[in-house]
Amino acid sequence: MAELLIHTDRIIGNIEKINAIMKKHGAQWTLISKVLSGHKDSLHRILAHDSVEGLHIIGDSRLSSLEVIKRLRPDIQTMYIKPVPQNLVPSIVQLADISLISSLRTLHLMNEAAGRNGVRHKVIVMIELGELREGIVRENIVDFYRQAFAMDNIVVIGI
């Protein structure tokens, strides 16, 4: 049977090293916890450590993992790190402070859900770069931003 060993002490050591480098350069960074799959004990050990205070955001692609993180540390900013499926918008607004947006329709749904929850949701806009995979088509970006900046419950924080 396969076994996954999680050395939280090594992860914490890496967090401390990256924090030091980023602080030296005046930069912030995001810890991606995806590999931990929401493992509560490992996340608890990591999130309880002082080094986490140097993190900007913790990101994951699983809502169940974000739920564990929010339960353990509601003060930490979280990010949903894949394009938002429209059917998960209400859950993502509750569990993630930041999400990646690739469509105007989804952005409108996020704005409505954030309004219902009384929050301003932060988004990073994904732009299609020619691979035809995911993102706003470049020709539509001006209109997209015009609408995004008019929304009361959305804050665009990046591209």
Image (tube, rainbow, N blue to C red):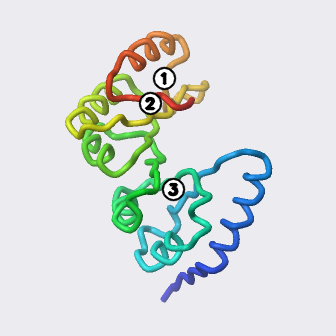
Give the residue type that dot 3 points to. Answer: Ile
CA gap, disc 3 to disc 1?
25 Å
Give the residue type that dot 2 points to. Answer: Ser
Q: Position of residue 41 (x, y in %)?
A: 44, 80
For this rendering, which residue is in front, 85 or 74?
Answer: 74
Q: Position of residue 4 (x, y in %)?
A: 54, 81
Q: Position of residue 37 (x, y in %)?
A: 44, 68
Per the image, the residue denoted by label 3 is 58
Asked whether disc 2 touches disc 3, contact meaning CB atoms under 8 Å apart, the reply is no
* Element at label 1: loop
Q: Residue furthest left?
A: 116
For this rendering, which residue is in front, 136 or 6?
Answer: 6
Q: Earlier in the sequence, mark 2 or mark 1?
A: 2
Taking 5 as reference, is 10 left or right? right
* Element at label 3: strand
Above/below status of 145 relative to 76? above
Q: Residues within 10 Å of mark 1 (few under 14, many from 20)?
A: some
Above/below status of 130 relative to 96? above
Asked whether disc 2 touches disc 1, contact meaning CB atoms under 8 Å apart, the reply is yes
For this rendering, which residue is in front, 69 or 81?
Answer: 69
Per the image, the residue denoted by label 2 is 102
Q: For the point 50% across and 34% down, which residue is it?
A: 124
Q: For the point 51% across and 19% down, which residue is it?
A: 137
* Element at label 2: loop
Per the image, the residue denoted by label 1 is 136
Judged by depth in the image, the label closer to the viewer, 2 or 3, is: 3
Q: Residues within 10 Å of mark 2 (few under 14, many from 20)?
A: many
Q: Residues within 10 Å of mark 3 (few under 14, many from 20)?
A: many
Q: Earlier in the sequence, mark 2 or mark 3?
A: 3
